[in-house]
Every structure is written in structure tokens, then in C-alpha cells.
């Protein structure tokens, strides 16, 4: 990888001392600062109530001890920045991007949400209806419904359910259960705070001392490891579909070097216009429009996910084409293909280096989930050669695989 465009990523962020809270700071000149908090409390920690982590994320915006829902959101609007949250399988993130002069007030608001949200019963009932509507909307999308169905069959245990949960689990959920979840997981030792931007280190330390607790209950234990579920071919049906949808999920080693090598392989095989699957499905055979290819990973799992669609009459042809393209890739890649894949990855990293908020989110999420830092990742990527990328693809090609198809 060229050094000039990735130079901002080659240096590790500073670690600031604040008790059991992990704090990362990176100075990037300019008028804005991105603030991100990652909590090790993603959906794999849901336990017997699928969707409770996602519901806890929603309730962060529904009122605190000092601010009701309207006052909280008005305060965020007064600061004028990007204020949002997100839940994944491994962690939950709360973030804010503001002008440098507003960083202390923004950190105060984030701390109020994280440590003083009240989760009132009436606001919970309203927000639960919102999430149930969100789940219904996702179920109406056949591509999303197939992905969730395939994922749930491939993974057992804590990873098998949708991040949003199910309508049935949401109806069983109570505000008291969400309060218990927040009390258990929203503790400084279970969080990483990352601050990236033009604010000074001294102002960050001053805000930390004023609004963020430094200690609390010990970090929660790691959840049970994901269990492998169904492999082979699964067929799902939905009435009145004119399209066939396919999702192919394959297990992969989850060590960082192999995951990065596999990511380069997926760039070559996958869904971009220059990639093999696109050229075969879209250009040579004209089978379908939607294609996807990605590597998903967590602390102790990784998978490749390929998706495609075609007309209902071409379902078998589509499935055969995807399998054949994957098998043929085991024969090896060209140096030119690897060069293009590296350029794409370098472009994404260069864009990341350009965004204070994205950098803060990446720093916080990687540290919270025990993944290599951005600087370590850049060094690992530079060390990967063609045999390593080919070997990573061959390993996942021989691994347990589920192909799920949805037709009318």
C-alpha cells in the first residue's frame, strides 16, 4: 500500500488515563471533533430476549434524569452536530460530531444518555411499537428476509437472531428488562471512548473528569460462543415472488490476518463491476441485477456472504453460476486482480482517514471488540501477498457453507 494516502492511519491514537474507562485520543486539525463510545453490548448479549440490546440503543434517546425526550433532542440540536447510535452483533455505539468548542457539552450529553437514561414505561411502549414496525418493514423485503433466515439457520445460539429481535420477543420485553440490561452492561470498564479532531487533549481530559465516571462494576463476561447450525441447501418460499433470491454463507477463520486476506479475495470474486461474480452473473449471462459480497466478523467468528437475485425461472442457473464462480476462483488470482483489490481497499482506508467521526467509530469499535487497531491493520494488509490471499479463499471454500434460496 502507498504510504502517503494512509499516513494518518499509521500512528496509534493516544491512550488517556481515566480509571477503568478506555479512552483513545487522536488530534486531527480542523474545526470539528468526532466522539464515539463503543459498549460491549451488541445483540449477541441479548440472552433470552432477542432485540433487547437494540431496544436499549433506542431508549438512550427517550429521556434521562435531567432531560426528557424533547429536551434531550433539543439539546443535541443546539450543539448542531451529528448525534446517533447503532447496534451490531458485538457492540453498540453512541456518537456525536460537533464543533471543537462544543466538545465538552457534547461529552456531557453522551454521559447523561449512557449513565442516566431512565427508560420510562410510556416511552418504552411507544418505542417498542416503532421497532415492531421496523421489523415488519424488514420482513416485507424478500432479500432482507432471506438474509435473516439464512443467518439464523447458519448460526445457532447468540448470533442466530436478527439484531432488531422478533415481533414475539419485542412483545415479551418490558421496560424493566431493558433497565436491567443497561445496568449490567453500561459500565466504564465495558466501554471505549474515542475522540478524534481539533479539540485539545487538555479539554478532553477536563470533560472526562467532569462528566464521565471512571469506575464501576467489572466488565461483563464474554457471551457463549456461536454454535454452527444448518449447512447445505435451504429453500424458502413466499407467494407471488417474481424473483429468486440467493444468499451463500461460508464459515471462515477469524484470525485478523486471514480475515484481511479473505477480504481481498472477496474483492476479486465479488460484486463490483470488475469482479468475477458480477461479470459472470450480470454481463455474460444477464441473470440478475442485485449482487452483494462481504466478509462479516466478530471476536470469535467470521463468514463470507454472497448474495444475488434473478428471475424466478432462472433460480437453478443462478445457483449453479454462483457455485461455479466460487469453485473456479480456487484456481488462483492474477497479480492484476490483486492490484485492483488493494487499490479499492486503500481507497476505503483513505476515505476513513478523511472523516473524524468515522475514525472515532473505528478506533472505539476495534478496541471494544479486541480487533487490531487501524495502524496494525494497515501493516497487516501491506504484508499480504498473492499466495496468502489465494489460500484464504481456498480455506473458506472448503468450510461449512449454507446456500439459501427464496422463490415464489
Image (cartoon, rainbow, N blue to C red):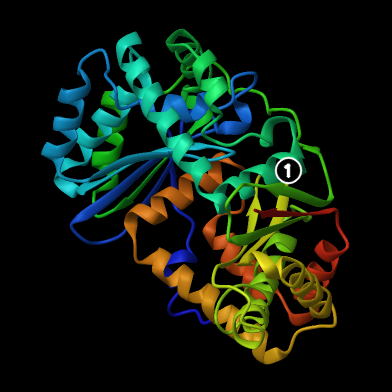
Residue 254 horizontal/vertical position (percent): 74, 52
Q: Residue at x 45, y 13 (%)?
A: 179
For residue 309, side relative to residue 37 (left or right): right
In this view, the residue farthest toward the front is 240
Q: Which residue is mark 1?
A: 300
Judged left or right of residue 1, residue 251 is right
Query: Residue sitting at 73 percent across and 79 percent down?
Result: 385
Q: Is the residue marked by circle 1 packed among few (<14), some (14-19), or many (20+) residues within 10 Å?
A: few
Q: Position of residue 407 (x, y in %)?
A: 67, 55
Mark 1: secondary structure: loop
Tell me if residue 254 can be seen. Answer: yes
Nearest to the observer: residue 253 or residue 403: 403
Quarter the N terminus occupies:
bottom right
Q: Position of residue 393 (x, y in %)?
A: 78, 69
Quarter-of-image position of residue 248: bottom right
Residue shown at 47%/70% (left/top)? Answer: 348
152 versus 258 height, above or below? above
Q: x%, y% of residue 397?
A: 83, 65
Q: Nearer the viewer, residue 210 or 229?
A: 229
Of 239 and 297, the residue lying toward us: 239
Q: Is residue 18 visible?
A: no
Q: Horizontally, is 146 left or right of 188 in the view? A: right
The answer to whether residue 147 is above or below residue 106 is: below
Residue at 19%, 35% (x, y): give it. Answer: 76
Q: Is residue 318 left or right of residue 133?
A: right
Q: Is residue 112 above or below residue 95?
A: above
Q: Quadrant of residue 367?
A: top right
- Count of picture labels: 1
Amino acid at each position: 500500500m502507498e504510504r502517503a494516502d494512509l499516513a494518518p492511519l499509521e500512528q496509534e491514537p493516544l491512550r488517556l488515563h481515566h480509571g477503568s474507562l478506555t479512552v483513545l485520543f487522536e488530534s486531527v486539525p480542523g474545526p470539528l471533533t468526532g466522539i464515539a463510545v463503543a459498549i460491549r453490548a451488541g445483540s449477541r448479549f441479548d440472552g433470552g430476549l432477542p432485540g433487547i440490546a437494540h431496544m436499549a440503543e433506542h431508549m438512550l434517546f427517550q429521556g434521562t434524569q435531567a432531560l426528557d425526550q424533547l429536551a434531550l433532542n433539543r439539546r443535541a440540536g443546539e450543539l448542531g452536530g451529528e448525534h446517533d447510535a447503532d447496534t451490531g452483533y458485538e457492540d453498540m455505539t453512541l456518537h456525536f460530531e460537533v464543533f471543537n468548542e462544543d466538545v465538552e457539552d457534547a461529552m456531557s450529553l453522551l454521559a447523561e444518555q449512557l449513565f442516566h437514561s431512565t427508560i420510562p414505561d410510556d416511552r418504552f411502549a411507544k418505542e417498542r411499537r416503532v421497532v415492531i414496525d421496523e421489523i415488519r418493514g424488514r420482513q416485507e423485503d424478500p432479500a432482507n428476509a432471506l438474509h435473516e433466515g439464512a443467518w439464523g439457520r447458519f448460526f445457532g445460539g447468540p448470533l442466530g437472531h436478527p439484531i432488531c429481535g422478533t415481533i414475539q420477543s419485542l412483545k415479551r420485553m418490558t421496560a424493566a428488562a431493558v433497565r436491567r440490561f443497561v445496568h449490567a452492561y453500561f459500565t466504564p470498564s465495558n466501554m471505549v471512548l474515542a475522540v478524534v479532531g481539533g479539540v485539545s487533549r487538555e479539554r478532553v481530559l477536563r470533560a472526562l473528569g467532569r462528566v464521565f465516571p471512571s469506575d464501576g462494576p467489572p466488565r461483563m463476561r464474554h457471551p457463549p460462543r456461536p454454535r454452527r447450525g444448518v449447512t447445505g441447501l435451504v429453500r424458502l418460499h413466499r407467494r407471488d415472488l417474481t424473483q429468486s433470491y440467493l444468499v451463500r454463507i461460508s464459515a471462515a477463520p477469524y484470525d485478523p490476518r486471514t480475515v484481511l486476506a479473505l477480504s481481498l479475495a472477496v474483492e476479486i470474486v465479488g460484486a463490483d463491476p470488475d469482479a468475477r461474480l458480477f461479470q459472470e452473473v450480470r454481463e455474460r449471462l444477464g441473470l440478475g441485477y442485485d449482487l452483494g459480497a462481504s466478509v462479516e466478523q466478530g471476536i470469535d467468528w467470521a463468514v463470507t456472504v454472497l448474495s444475488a437475485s434473478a428471475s424466478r425461472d432462472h433460480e437453478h442457473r443462478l445457483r449453479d453460476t454462483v457455485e461455479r464462480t466460487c469453485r473456479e476462483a480456487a484456481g488462483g488470482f492474477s497479480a492484476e486482480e490483486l492490484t485492483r483489490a488493494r487499490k479499492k481497499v486503500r481507497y476505503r482506508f483513505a476515505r476513513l482517514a478523511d472523516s473524524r467521526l468515522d475514525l472515532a467509530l473505528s478506533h472505539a469499535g476495534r478496541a471494544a471488540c479486541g480487533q487490531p487497531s487501524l495502524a496494525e491493520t494497515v501493516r497487516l494488509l501491506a504484508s499480504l501477498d498473492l499466495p496468502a490471499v489465494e489460500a484464504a479463499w481456498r480455506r473458506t471454500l472448503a468450510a461449512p457453507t449454507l446456500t439459501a434460496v427464496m422463490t415464489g
